[in-house]
């Protein structure tokens, strides 16, 4: 059986995880988004979707969203 987790334990874990979740450049916290890029394959002419998770903050917002 899974161990019960209280709200206080969840908050403590979230605050511990967020300590390294700050950008060293602008000191904003990161938000993680899933970036999906579509590319056309030259050989077959089909579309390929590449998915990856990107950490976005204020200083790299324009690079990710365009």
Image (cartoon, rainbow, N blue to C red):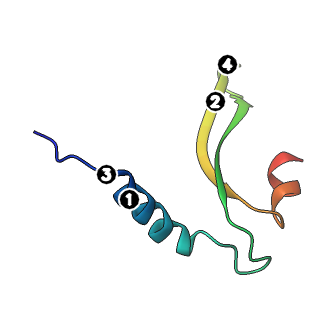
- Nearest to the eye among marks 3 and 4: give it: 3
Q: Are marks 1 and 3 in contact (CB under 8 Å)?
A: yes
Q: Nearer the viewer, residue 45 or 37?
A: 37
Instruction: Please say if the residues under marks 2 and 3 sit with CB atoms less than 8 Å apart.
Output: no
Side of 3 relative to 33 (left or right):
left
Q: Residues within 10 Å of mark 2 (few under 14, many from 20)?
A: few
Give the answer, above or below, for where 18 lies relative to 64.
below
Q: How many marks?
A: 4
Spatial separation of the CA atoms under disc 2 and disc 3: 39 Å
> Marks 4/2: CA distance?
10 Å
Dots 3 and 4: beta carbons under 8 Å? no
Tag 1 or tag 2, which sits nearer the N-term? 1
Q: Judge by depth and name the residue closer to the eye, 57 or 11.
A: 11
Label 4: which residue? 46
| Residue with the mark numbered 2 | 49
User: Residue at point 64% right, 27% down?
Assistant: 48
Residue under the image location 70 percent in, 73 percent down: 23
Distance from disc 2 to disc 1, alpha carbons, whole Å, reads 40 Å
Local SS, label 2: strand
Give the x, y percent position of residue 17: 47, 66
Provide residue 65's location: percent of width, then percent of height: 84, 46
Foreground mark, 2 or 1, reads 1
Mark toward the viewer: 1 or 4: 1
Quadrant the N terminus occupies: top left
Mark-to-mark CA distance, 1 and 4: 49 Å
Q: Which residue is mark 3?
A: 6
Q: Which of the 4 quarters of the picture holds residue 16?
A: bottom left
Neighbor class of circle 1 (other Cα within 10 Å; few <14, some 14-19, many 20+) is few
Mark 2 or 3: in front is: 3
């Amino acid at each position: 059986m899974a161990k019960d987790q209280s709200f206080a334990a969840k908050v403590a874990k979230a605050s511990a995880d967020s300590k390294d979740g700050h950008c060293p450049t602008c000191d904003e916290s990161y938000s993680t988004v899933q970036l999906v890029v579509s590319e056309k394959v030259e050989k077959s002419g089909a579309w390929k979707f590449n998915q990856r998770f990107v950490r976005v903050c204020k200083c790299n917002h324009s690079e990710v969203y365009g």
